[in-house]
Every structure is written in C-alpha cells, then in structure tokens.
Amino acid sequence: MKPVRPVSSDSRVDVPSESSIVKNFSLVLGGPFYALLRRLKLVEPAPNIRGRIAMLLILTWVPLACLSALEGVLFGHNVSLPLLYDFSIYGRFFLALPLIIIAEVVIDPKIRHVVTTFDESGLIGTAALARYHSALERISRLRDSGMAELLLLVFASLPIFMLDQEEWISQQFTTWHGNTSGGLSGAGYWFVFVSSPILRFLLLRWLWRYFVWSLLLFHVMKLDLNLTPAHPDLLGGLGFVLDAQRHFGILSAAIGSILAGQFGNSVAYFGDTLGSTKVPMIAFVLIAVFIVLCPLTLLSPKLSALRRAGLARYSQLARQLTKSFDAKWTQDGNGTRETILGSPDPSSVADLVSSYNVVRDLKIVPIDRKLVLQVAAEAAAPLAIVWLVATPAERIVANLIKMLF
C-alpha cells in the first residue's frame, strides 16, 4: 500500500484525503488479522500467497500428520479410516484453504477497479462524489472492525463439528481422530480446536468482507448516477460491476471443496450411494449461485428507472426523426424531391433504431445465462471430482459414447 503524502497547510485537505480513500480501498487489506500477518512478515513481499498457504498447512495439516503417525493411524489398517485416506482432509486443507487465500489476488484487484471506475469515469456526479467517498470511508472502518473479527474468531473457535456423522460417533468404524476409549485422539483434538477453527475463521472472514462489499454496492446505488441507456453493455455502463462480481465464484469453489470431501467419505466409507448425494450437491450449487449473484439485484432499481426514462426519450426522438424522414422521402411535397441515394438521412434513422433497440434490451436484472453457468461451474467443479472418482471408468466411457452417437 502506497503511503499518503502529507498535505501542506495551504492546500485543500479534503482532495488528497478523498483520493487516498479511493486508491487505497481494498477488501483484503486492513483489520487486526491482516495487521498480525504484516507483523509476522507473512504478506511480504505482497501478497505472498505461497508463503501464507505453506504456513497455514504447517499449522493445520502437518500436526495432524505427525500426531497420526505417532499414533499409528496415518496409514495402514490399524483403523478403518487413516488420515491419508480421509477425503475430507484433502478437501479442507489442500483445496479449500489455498482457494480462500488465492481468492485475494483474484477478487481484490477487480474490486479496486470498480471503486476507481466509479470515482473517475463520471458515473457519479460531482455533487455526489463527497457522499461516495464518505461511504467508502465508512465501509473501510467496517471492514477493519476489530469487534467483527473478534466475533468471527469466537464463532470459528467453537468446537462445532457434525457429531451426528457416523465417522465421529460409530463404535464399529474407527478413524484417525478417535481413540480406543471412544474419545478424540491427539490428532482429533488438534483438528477440532486448531485446524478446523483456522479454516472456519478464514472462510468467515471472507464472508464478512463479501457482506461489506454488498453494503458498498447498496450505498452506491442510492447515489445519483450518470447512466447511459444506450450503452452497449446493456447495463447503462455498469457492466464492469458484473465482471467483478463473478470472481466471487472462487469462494463457492472453496466451500464446494469442503463438501466434496465429506461426500467422498460418505460414498467411500459409509455406504451412501452416489445418487444419494445428487440432491444436496444440486442444492448447494443453486444456493451458491444465488448468494454470489444476489447483490447484483441491487442494481435493478436504477436499471429499471433508466430503461423507462430511456425508452420515453428515445421514443420521442424517434417520432420526430421518423416523421421528418417520412415527410421528406415518402410523401410528395411541392413536386421537388431529392434522390435518397447518398443521403445521410437513412443512416441517421438506422442509427436511431439501433440505439432504441439497445435501450429496449437494457437488462433490468443484470444476470445472464453465461454468468450463472460460470458461477455454477465453479461451485460444482469440486463436487464433479467426487462423481468422476466414484463412477466406474467403463460407465463413464459408455456414457460418453452414448452422448456422441
């Protein structure tokens, strides 16, 4: 983050301050947890994604492996489910955890671009810019809230895990996280009180920042925006917001990885059929698509009003232009008629018709099929791995041949 230059006493204080608010805005930077990472040198050189993923694996998975090895449950047949055969562990710490960290470099640059574009493109009028900067400042304080992160940490630290799952309570099915007396093993305690809370905190922290981002969109949509009804993006010039929003799909992939590991265990070790996972998988994908795309509906009131106003203006202009064109070229006037060949009049009418069609097709709900499919594919990708692994190869080949022929 670039330091803000001090402002001289004879300069306007508000201008550099507002400029720094826009340029330094981030969903990732800020807050007590990020300050801790900076003190530990874990974000240097920024963003140090590899270093942080390695550190988190050392805190979460490596102790599980070491403790399991000491207890003889890392692999082999001492228990029904050794650590290295547990699909849920891979889903959590080798897929979800890296994706949560990688999401920073995927999402944050797009959010910065949106914030800067609103400030510099003229979409927000000069009179409303002060309110926009004020909203950014309030959102930044909310993002950096120590109380919010403390509550997230407390909630993430609660020893919550699915006690009704057979792998945790069954006396017949032994696992790496249990012991002979029916309690938790050393690795089990580390998982419940260290590894799992770390993952939950990181995920909850992202969900909090997602809420903060949605709140910022809400505030921006309350401002007086200079939208263009005939803009070719069919969104009045707000297409760049959709481009940023779709990148939140990587968080759906992270959550999907956790679920995929659980489904893998259910099918491989607990007798569930692949078909029994179909409904919860589909439900998750639908919920993920809804959550990721729902904030875009905050744009709908502005787009609906823009479309109504745009159609009214362009209809009036079309009546005037087509009436003039009709009077000049299709009706006999005083007996003197120009040749239409080479005249710019037909081109003007065609351009107006094209612009009118753009206004007519302006999207009130800024969600299209491509966007839905992209987010759904990201959420479903980890779950698809379960189906591919659990489905016999000959069945996959047979289905492919059937589809082709």
Image (cartoon, rainbow, N blue to C red):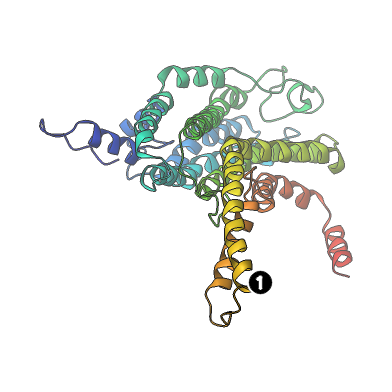
Q: Quadrant of residue 298?
A: top right
Q: Position of residue 248 (x, y in %)?
A: 56, 42
Q: Position of residue 173 (x, y in %)?
A: 79, 28
* Residue at the limit of the structure toward the front, as seen here: 334
Assess disc 1: are there few (<14), some (14-19) or many (≥20) residues with their C-alpha within 10 Å of its C-alpha.
few
Q: Residue at x 60, y 57 (%)?
A: 318
Q: Secondary structure at mark 1?
A: loop
Instruction: Using residue 284 as the reference point, say whether residue 229 is left or right of it.
Output: left
Pick whichever, 323 or 364, lies toward us. 323
Instruction: Using residue 394 as the reference point, say whether residue 303 is left or right of it.
Output: left
Q: Residue at x 55, y 22 (%)?
A: 156
Pick whichever, 129 or 91, lies toward us. 129
Instruction: Using residue 71 as the reference point, say whether residue 283 is left or right of it.
Output: right
In the rendered image, the vertical position of residue 158 relative to residue 2, given as above or below: above
Q: Position of residue 153 (x, y in %)?
A: 50, 20
Q: Quadrant of residue 275?
A: top right
Dividing the image into 4 quarters, which one contains the N terminus?
top left
Q: Residue at x 62, y 29 (%)?
A: 71
Q: Count the marks.
A: 1
Note whether residue 394 is visible: yes
Dividing the image into 4 quarters, which one contains the C terminus?
bottom right
In the rendered image, the vertical position of residue 189 relative to residue 405, given as above or below: above
Note whether residue 75 is visible: no
In the rendered image, the vertical position of residue 124 relative to residue 180, given as above or below: below
Instruction: Tell me which amino acid carries mark 1.
Output: Gln
Q: Residue at x 55, y 72 (%)?
A: 345
Q: Position of residue 368 (x, y in %)?
A: 66, 50
Q: Which residue is mark 1?
A: 331
